[in-house]
Amino acid sequence: MRTRQRRRNPERGVDPADLVEFAVRWHPYGGADASEVLVCFGISLHTYGERLSAALAGSAHGIVMAHQLHDDLVAYAHRIRQ
């Protein structure tokens, strides 16, 4: 018996909180690579960096984090957008 996997629809967009939570989970490992981002969100690493940057710039994600972690994630988002 086959089970269906739910696929993310990149046209619907991704919740900013999901982007930030994903970045926080991958932070200890230097951030996620392109294949992980593609599998989880269906977008390129560059696009993920743009959306993560926007999510971190606003407070819509609702995640409380230390200033250093926030700064690290902003730097990561900037790096992968290049």
Image: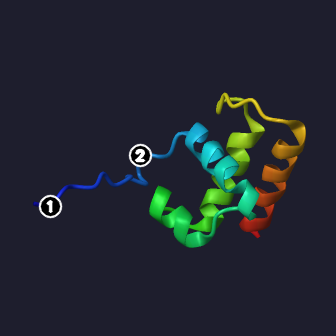
Viewer-nearest residue: 46 or 25: 25
Query: Circle 1 sits on which residue?
Result: 2
Relative horizontal placement of residue 9, taking residue 29 as reference (left or right): left
Amino acid beneath label 2: Arg
Residue 42 makes an appearance in the image: no
**What residue is drawn where x is 84% and y is 52%?**
72
- Quadrant housing the C terminus: bottom right
Query: Circle 2 sits on which residue?
Result: 12
Please state the horizontal and vertical placement of residue 58, each as a whole percent of the image: 73, 34
Badge 1 element: loop
Please state the horizontal and vertical placement of residue 14, each as a whole percent of the image: 50, 45
**Do tag 1 and tag 2 residues touch (Cβ < 8 Å)?**
no
Badge 2 element: loop
**What residue is drawn where x is 75% and y is 57%?**
28
Viewer-nearest residue: 20 or 82: 20
Q: Is residue 34 above or below residue 63?
A: below
Please state the horizontal and vertical placement of residue 46, each as a whole percent of the image: 65, 66
Viewer-nearest residue: 33 or 48: 33
**What residue is drawn where x is 77% and y is 39%?**
57
Q: Is residue 15 above or below residue 49?
A: above
Tally of numbered tags = 2
Q: How far apart are the alpha carbons under marks 1 and 2? A: 26 Å
